[in-house]
Image: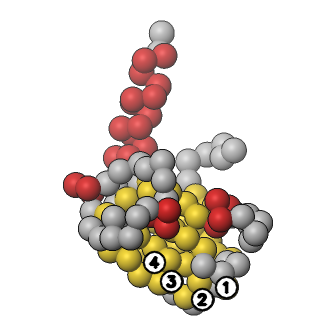
Amino acid sequence: RLEEPAEALATVRSPPAASLRARLRRFHYHEHALNALLHGRKRWWLLPPQDAVYSVRHPAAWPPGAAKEACSFIQKAGDVVFKPTNWAHAVLNEEPSIGAAFEFLDAYIVASNSKRVIEPYAT
């Protein structure tokens, strides 16, 4: 838990390589993020904000051609991906991977989320 606001939050994940479920992230969206891959290989799918969704199934489990609207690419070790705010993305670790993700918060996001979360509970 962060005690003070931060400009970037880092996420570290090390799921077991054997499970497909542990190797993928379903479509979701959030603020700007940088994703650096130190080792391995990842397949990405991106959807622009007007098509952004939170999905219950990963694109790898969809029928062939169902994710044709999504931009898809491979991230290799040494690549850094910039994911803009509200672009939906799904990721599949095609190999055991080590990386770091940094999500950037700006003053507007912090203020609007604080207002939405805190005001209903203010006395």
Q: Is residue 46 visible to us here?
A: no
- Disc 2 marks which residue? 77
Are dots 3 and 1 in contact, CB under 8 Å?
no
Q: Check residue 81 in the rendering and tell me which mark sits there, or answer none.
A: 4
- Disc 1 marks which residue? 39
- Badge 2 local density, few (<14 within 10 Å), some, or many (20+)? some
| Front residue of this view, candidates 18 and 82 | 18
Are dots 3 and 2 in contact, CB under 8 Å?
no
Q: Is residue 40 visible to us here?
A: yes
The extreme top residue here reads 123
Report which quarter residue 25 is drawn in.
bottom right
Front tag of 3 and 4: 3
| Front residue of this view, candidates 62 and 75 | 62
Are dots 2 and 4 in contact, CB under 8 Å?
no
| Residue type marked 3 | Gln
How many numbered markers are drawn?
4
| Residue type marked 2 | Ala
